[in-house]
Image: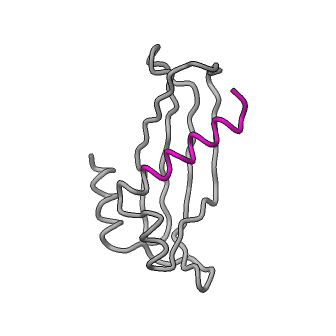
């Protein structure tokens, strides 16, 4: 699998994690907000091949007023082996002003619950 595959799977996992804390495409449209990735670090540990069963496990690391950090682990599900790890830092944005803005309190609360887990 090439780098594009890994990044694409991590992007899909990000959308699922954001939805779990209350940030969805529809909520961002309604509030004219967004989430911008500002740093992404990927560590490749083992190659995946076509036909491998892939599982992504995600967890929140931290959330502040405007910034959050989370991690995705890409695993070979049959071997239960970590193949790649992606750590991301993202900022909540006001799409009208194109500047960072505070996360809604409900989003922060839900993310903090996932961190405390």
Q: Quadrant of residue 30 in the image?
A: bottom left
Q: Is residue 6 above or below residue 61?
A: above
Q: How many marks?
A: 0
Observer-nearest of 5 and 100: 5
Q: Is residue 50 above or below residue 65?
A: above
**Residue occupying the far bottom of the picture:** 97
Q: Quadrant of residue 84 in the image?
A: top right
Q: Residue at x 36, y 63 (%)?
A: 22
Mainly helix, strand or loop, the magenta region?
Answer: helix
Q: Quadrant of the N terminus?
A: top right
Is residue 98 a member of the stretch shown in magenta? Answer: no
Q: Residue at x 28, y 50 (%)?
A: 116
Q: Residue at x 63, y 80 (%)?
A: 98
What segment carries the magenta color? 1-16
Q: Is residue 40 above or below residue 91?
A: above
Query: Which percent across, then down, holds residue 10?
Result: 56, 42
């Amino acid at each position: 699998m090439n780098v594009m595959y890994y990044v694409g799977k991590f992007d899909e996992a990000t959308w699922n994690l954001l939805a779990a804390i209350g940030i969805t495409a529809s909520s961002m449209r309604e509030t004219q907000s967004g989430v911008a990735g500002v740093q992404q670090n990927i560590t490749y540990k083992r190659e995946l091949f076509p036909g491998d069963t892939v599982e992504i496990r995600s967890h929140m690391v931290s959330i502040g007023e405007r910034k959050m950090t989370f991690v995705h682990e890409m695993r070979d599900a049959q071997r239960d082996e970590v193949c790649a790890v992606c750590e991301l830092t993202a900022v909540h944005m006001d799409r009208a002003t194109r500047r960072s803005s505070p996360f809604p309190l409900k989003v922060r609360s839900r993310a903090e619950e996932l961190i405390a887990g």
